[in-house]
Image (cartoon, rainbow, N blue to C red):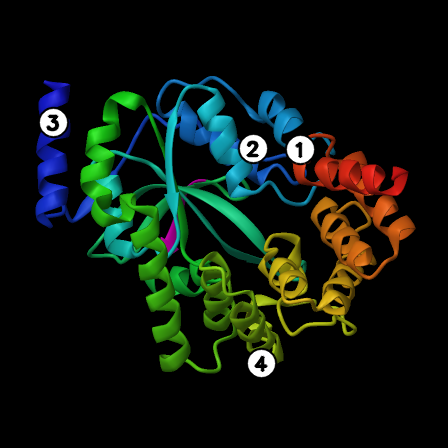
Amino acid sequence: MRLLAFSLLLGLALAGNLPSKVSLSGVRHEYQRYNNCGPVTIGMAMSYWGGQETQYQIAPVLKPNPRDKNVSLEEMVAYARSKGYQVRYGVAGDYDLLKRLLAAKFPTIIESWFVVPPTGGMGHYRLLVGYDQKAGYFNAFDSYYGPHVTLKYRDLDGLWQVFNRTYMVVYPSAREAEIKAILGERSDQAKLLQEALALAKSETQAQPRNAFAWFNLGDMLLKQGDAKGAAAAYDRSRSLPVYVAFDPGRPANTVANWPWRMMWYQFGPYEAYYKAGRYSDVITLANDVLRRIDDHEESYYWRGLARQAQGNLAGAKADFQAALRYRWSYQEAAQALKSLNVGASR
C-alpha cells in the first residue's frame, strides 16, 4: 500500500498535477550548537530515512575545528554517501522542482542567505518538508529557529539566489529511479551546468544591478573553464552597491561590496582570480577574511597558492600548514604543502 501511495504521488508530481499542500512527517528536529548548521541539517535529512546520527556524531567528522564557520555542501554529500545514502544536488533550482520533490516525499535541503539582525547575514542550510501553494510558502525544519518554519515564496528566492539556488536530496538507493524521473535532464551534470549558465546570463541582463546574479554568472563561467570571464563577472558583482538588507551590521572597512561574510562560504572568486593570474586580488580577499576570523582554512589555502605563485614560499608554507591545522583532512592543502616541500628539496 505504501509503495502504491508513493507511485501515485510520483505520477502526480511528474504529470505536473501537484497537490496544493504537502507536509512530510518523520523528520527528527535538532537545534544547532555553535556553527553546526550543516551537521544538524544533514542529520535531519538522514533521520527521515531512519538515520540516528546527530550533530554530536556528525560535527566532529565534518568540522574537526569546532569554530569552523563553514561546512560545504560537498562535505555534507560525502558524509551522507559514507553512511550508505544516495545524494543528488545541483544549482539553478526553482520552486517547481522543490515542490515536485516534496510531493514525491523527498525532503530537500537548500542553502540560502540568512539574516539575523543585528548580527548580520550568513549562509544557512534548511530542510524543506512541505509547502502550501495557496498560502504561498514552504515549510522547513530550521536548525536555528526550530521545526515548521514558514518560508514565504516572495521572500525566499532572493535569499536562495545568493547561493545560486542550490538544492540537495538525500535518499536510499531503492528510490533512485524516482529521483531521476523527477530531475529529468537535471540528472545530467553537463546539461545542468549549461542551464545554470543560461539562467545566470539571463538574470544579469534582466537585473544588471543585482550583484548575486553576476556572482552566479562568475560561478558558472568558472565551471565551464572560463576563469577570465568568471573573474570579470566577479569584478562586476563586487563593484555594485552593497545590498544593506542582506548585510545589517556590516563592518565599515570591508574590501568588497558583497555581504561581509560572503567569502566564508563561497570560494569561486579565489579560484577565478588565481587561475587568471590575479594573485594580489586573491591575497587581498583572503586577508579581509582572515583579519576577522583567523581560522578560515579555505582562505589560508588560496592565499597560500597565490603567495607561492608570487614566489613567497615561506608565506605559502605557513598558510598551507595553517589550513591543515584547522582541518587536518583538507586534501588540497595537504597536496599543496607536499608539492611545495618536494620542490624546495630539489
Q: Nearer the viewer, residue 310 or 263?
A: 310
Of mark 1 and mark 3, the one earlier in the sequence is 3
What crowding class fits label 2: few (fewer than 14 Cα within 10 Å), some (14-19), or many (20 or more)? many
The extreme right residue here reads 314
Query: Which element carries disc 4, helix, strand or loop?
Result: loop
> To which residue does mark 3 refer?
5
Instruction: Tell me if label 1 and label 2 are in contact, CB under 8 Å.
Output: yes
Query: Which element carries disc 3, helix, strand or loop?
Result: helix
> To which residue does mark 1 refer?
63
Compared to residue 276, the image places residue 311 above or below, namely above
Q: Would residue 73 be found to the left or right of residue 100 on screen?
A: right
Q: Would residue 220 be found to the left or right of residue 279 on screen?
A: left
Measure the alpha-carbon separation of dots 1 and 2: 9 Å
Magenta region: 147-151
Percent across and percent down for residue 265 are 61, 52
Instruction: Tell me if label 2 and label 4 are in contact, CB under 8 Å.
Output: no
Measure the alpha-carbon separation of dots 4 and 1: 33 Å
> To which residue does mark 2 refer?
39
